[in-house]
Image: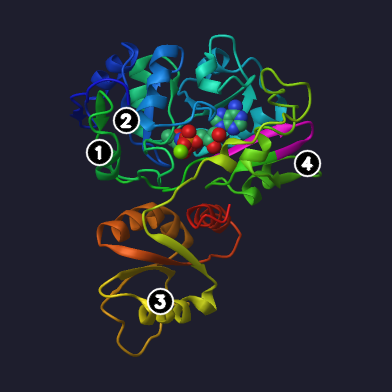
């Protein structure tokens, strides 16, 4: 981070006018959204958006999502909106869906990392909406974590990551979704999911015309891949750019503890093996779906910190909070049950694989 630490103001959810004024004046404000906490700046202010990258320690080649509330502001951000994207926004906005669209002229290079496309989201969270409305400008906001770490899904996590690095943090309730938004783009007559989230493949497939394929691609292949929505990277020849993609080089979503993934039937055997291998007092975090893999009889070793979720929605909501809890309680390993890859289970699995260093 450039310069001395900032004196970070803590605002409550009734002080969104103050947050909006700070954003208008070129400052940085962390605020709650329904997915994760975001680190916002005026998306039309290049210097303010540059400061986001410094506050996060984020590589400059990873573009930001621009958040708006007023549909009339879409034209400030995107040069055009194709009919399929329009349909997706009509159905899923406001909410946890981000669409990649051709970029409008007023969006600075730093926001899009030089791409000719821009990512746009209409958040549903009332505090996020009030902050953005008060700012009166589109707001660029990545997740409010230090780069490479799990996204903050409650005030305490946002504070730990960002105090001293931003002008204000708006205190809200824990995020309802707990995973970052679905990022999608329309390429010709198909829809590509660049990042899975609470708006699932199945939900998108339901609202697009029959025959429109919905395919999941790694965002990091995509950011250097198809040219239909993004265009070639600056300085590259038309077609896929010959540079490594950000996600290949940068780590994502990783807690301090090592993350080990286990199929439902393997969770307890994995935990037992780790307990017997564990040196000294090392603790083991276990994240599981209720009623599927935990023995109903016999004592659980005191070194095991077990969290069971009642549903996949709860798993998504608690995932990053549990990573923090396990780090805070000194776990050296986290065993996470792999959910089925349907519905939001697919997004959970994606984040787990990244946390485990498999992607
Ligand atoms: O839920 C969310 O999306 C949160 C809240 C704050 O809205 N934001 C968030 O932002 O997760 P961030 O910066 O952590 O993730 C943005 C993702 C990255 O994977 C980035 O590469 C991708 O969106 N992205 C942004 N602009 C893009 C573009 N023009 N083309 C392709 N991918 C893009
Ligand atoms: Mg992020």
Residue placed under numbered mark 3 in the picture: 274
Q: Which of 178 and 164 is in front in this view?
A: 164
Q: Distance between the residues labelled 2 and 1?
A: 9 Å
Residue placed under numbered mark 4 in the picture: 212
Q: How far apart are marks 4 and 1 (CA)?
A: 42 Å
- Image spot of residue 276 (x, y percent): 37, 82
- Image spot of residue 98 (x, y percent): 55, 34
Q: Which of marks 2 and 4 is in front?
A: 2
Task: Determine whether 330 is above or below 203 in the image.
Answer: below
Local secondary structure at mark 1? helix
Is residue 187 located in the magenta-colored stretch of the structure?
Answer: yes
Taking the image as shown, residue 123 lies to the left or right of residue 26, namely right
Give the magenta-colored segment's residue range. Answer: 182-191
Q: How crowded is mark 1: few (under 14 residues within 10 Å), some or many (20 or more)?
A: many
Total numbered labels placed on residues in the image = 4
Q: How crowded is mark 2: few (under 14 residues within 10 Å), some or many (20 or more)?
A: many
- The answer to whether residue 99 is seen in the rendering is no
Q: Nearer the viewer, mark 3 or mark 2?
A: 3
Sequence order check, earlier mark of 3 and 2: 2
On residue 52, the disc is: none
Residue placed under numbered mark 2 in the picture: 30
Q: How far apart are marks 2 and 4 (CA)?
A: 37 Å
- The answer to whether residue 319 is seen in the rendering is yes
Local secondary structure at mark 4? loop
SS assignment for the magenta stretch, majority = strand
Taking the image as shown, residue 240 lies to the left or right of residue 281, namely right
On residue 159, the disc is: 1
Sequence order check, earlier mark of 1 and 3: 1
Task: Determine whether 297 is above or below 11 in the image.
Answer: below
Sequence order check, earlier mark of 2 and 1: 2
């Amino acid at each position: 981070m450039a310069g001395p630490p900032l004196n970070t103001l803590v605002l409550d959810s009734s002080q969104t006018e103050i947050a909006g004024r700070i954003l208008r004046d070129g400052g940085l404000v962390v605020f709650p959204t329904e997915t994760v906490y975001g680190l916002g700046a005026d998306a039309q202010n290049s210097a303010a958006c540059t400061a986001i990258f410094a506050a996060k320690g984020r590589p400059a080649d990873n573009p930001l999502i621009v958040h708006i509330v007023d549909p009339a502001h879409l034209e400030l951000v995107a040069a055009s909106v194709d009919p399929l994207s329009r349909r997706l926004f009509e159905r899923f906005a406001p909410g946890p869906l981000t669409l990649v669209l051709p970029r409008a002229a007023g969006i600075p290079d730093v926001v899009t990392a030089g791409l000719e496309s821009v990512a746009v989201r209409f958040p549903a969270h009332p505090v996020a909406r009030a902050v953005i409305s008060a700012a009166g400008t589109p707001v660029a906001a990545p997740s409010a974590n230090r780069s490479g770490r799990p996204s903050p899904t409650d005030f305490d996590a946002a504070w730990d990551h960002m105090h001293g690095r931003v002008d204000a943090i708006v205190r809200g309730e824990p995020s309802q979704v707990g995973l970052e938004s679905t990022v999608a783009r329309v390429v010709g007559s198909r829809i590509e999911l660049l990042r899975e989230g609470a708006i699932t493949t199945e939900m998108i497939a339901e609202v697009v015309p029959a025959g429109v394929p919905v395919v999941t691609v790694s965002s990091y292949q995509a950011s250097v891949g198809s040219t239909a929505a993004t265009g070639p990277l600056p300085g590259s020849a038309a077609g896929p750019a010959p540079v490594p993609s950000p996600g290949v080089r940068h780590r994502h979503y990783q807690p301090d503890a090592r993350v080990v993934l286990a199929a439902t039937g393997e969770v307890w055997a994995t935990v037992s093996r780790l307990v017997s291998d564990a040196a000294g007092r090392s603790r083991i975090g276990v994240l599981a779906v209720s009623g599927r893999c935990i023995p109903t009889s016999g004592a659980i070793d005191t070194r095991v910190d077990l969290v069971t979720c009642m549903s996949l929605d709860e798993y998504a909501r608690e995932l990053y909070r549990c990573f923090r809890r396990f780090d805070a309680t000194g776990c050296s390993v986290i065993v996470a049950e792999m959910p089925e890859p349907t519905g939001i289970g697919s997004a959970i699995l994606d984040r787990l694989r990244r946390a485990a260093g498999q992607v």
